[in-house]
Image (tube, grey):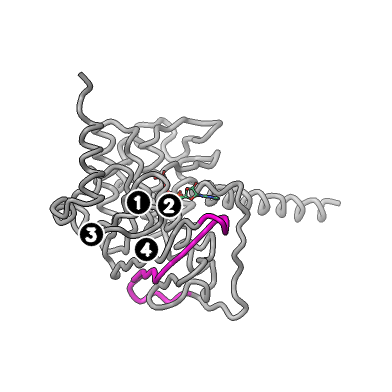
Amino acid sequence: MIQLFVPLGFLGFIYREIREALTNIERLFGLLEAPVKVADAEDAKPLQITGGAVDFDQVSHAYDPARPILQGVDLHIPAGHTLAIVGPSGAGKSTLARLLFRFYDVGGGAIRIDGQDIRGVTQDSLRQAIGVVPQDTVLFNDSIGYNIAYGKPGATEEQIWQALRMAQLEDFVRRLPKGLNTQVGERGLKLSGGEKQRIAIARVLLKNPPILILDEATSSLDTHAERLILDALNLISQKRTTLAIAHRLSTIVHAERILVLDQGRVVEQGSHEELLAAGGAYARLWADQQREQQPQG
Ligand code: ATP
């Protein structure tokens, strides 16, 4: 009886772990209601990273066949570079990230990483290569240490502290009486949006992936918290191929290249200065946001 009990208990543990991990990943992209439909091809091979270049070639996608979301999107990020995506709400920005993570297969065109179509590689190797800092980080009901080491099972305490330092969270955790063992999540310490996002940054630092998806959500933070996050994001995106989804233009003024998406199409690309000078969609978005930030009087 005892012999049976132990393996069953262990299976239950594994099941809970897997379910929690899936729930977490799916929540990153607001996908809880959407069944994940992709599967590895029979001859799927592990992704071979040579630098981490990301290419979308004429990518189309529709969640519902009657309503196209992305239409013929061309997007190229050379290895180690950053591309910021801006555009009105509903333009399809997060959809680009979901397709790169292969939550869905493209309806048309192809996404390649270092020249390999992501439909031909194992999902496991693809997801190992990509780190995500989502808008809304979901924490496990476990310790801070566990929540960070989740990025790299088997990480040492020293590595966890180093990740915390780089994510600008070290002082915060050192001040907690239980330090890394502090329980967080629904049944533990409640963290602010900015602290949770820095936990996600620390996870990514430990995972050390060549490709990053950043979903910048700094709108609810005060200026100091926003500065901490932006500094940490700048740090982790160095030398990694980064797709940065920006909801507020002020956060990407210094991005080397910005792509403007509108109704599922690429309408403009360039630096902040180039796009302002062009006087098109980006210049209009910029003017709108500047107006919104004016004090009401
Ligand atoms: P925001 O800045 O508001 O987050 P976004 O540019 O990231 O917007 P997406 O989340 O990519 O926009 O959504 C693009 C369109 O696809 C929206 O009209 C949205 O309603 C639709 N959409 C997103 N997810 C799904 C889904 N799982 N099923 C059906 N439609 C969806």
Q: In this view, does 153 lie above or below 105?
A: above
Q: Does the magenta stretch include residue 61?
A: yes
Q: Which mark is residue 245?
A: 1
Disc 1 CB within 8 Å of nearest ligand 1 atom:
yes
From mark 4 to mark 1, how far is it between C-alphas? 14 Å
Q: What residue type is labelled 1?
A: Ile
Q: Three-letter amino acid code at disc 2?
A: Ser
Front residue of 4 and 46? 46
Q: Residue at the location (20% across, 48% down)?
A: 253
Counting the numbered discs, the total is: 4
Cβ atoms under marks 4 and 2 closer than 8 Å = no
Res 257 label: 3
What is the distance, in whole Å, between disc 4 and disc 2 at their CAs? Answer: 16 Å
Q: What element carries label 1?
A: strand
Q: Is residue 148 above or below residue 77?
A: above
Q: What element carries label 4?
A: strand
> Are discs 1 and 2 less than 8 Å apart at CB?
yes
Q: Reply above or below: 59 against 7.
A: below
Magenta stretch: give its range. 47-67
Gap in Å between the C-alphas at discs 3 and 4? 16 Å
- Mark 1 or mark 3: which comes first in sequence? 1
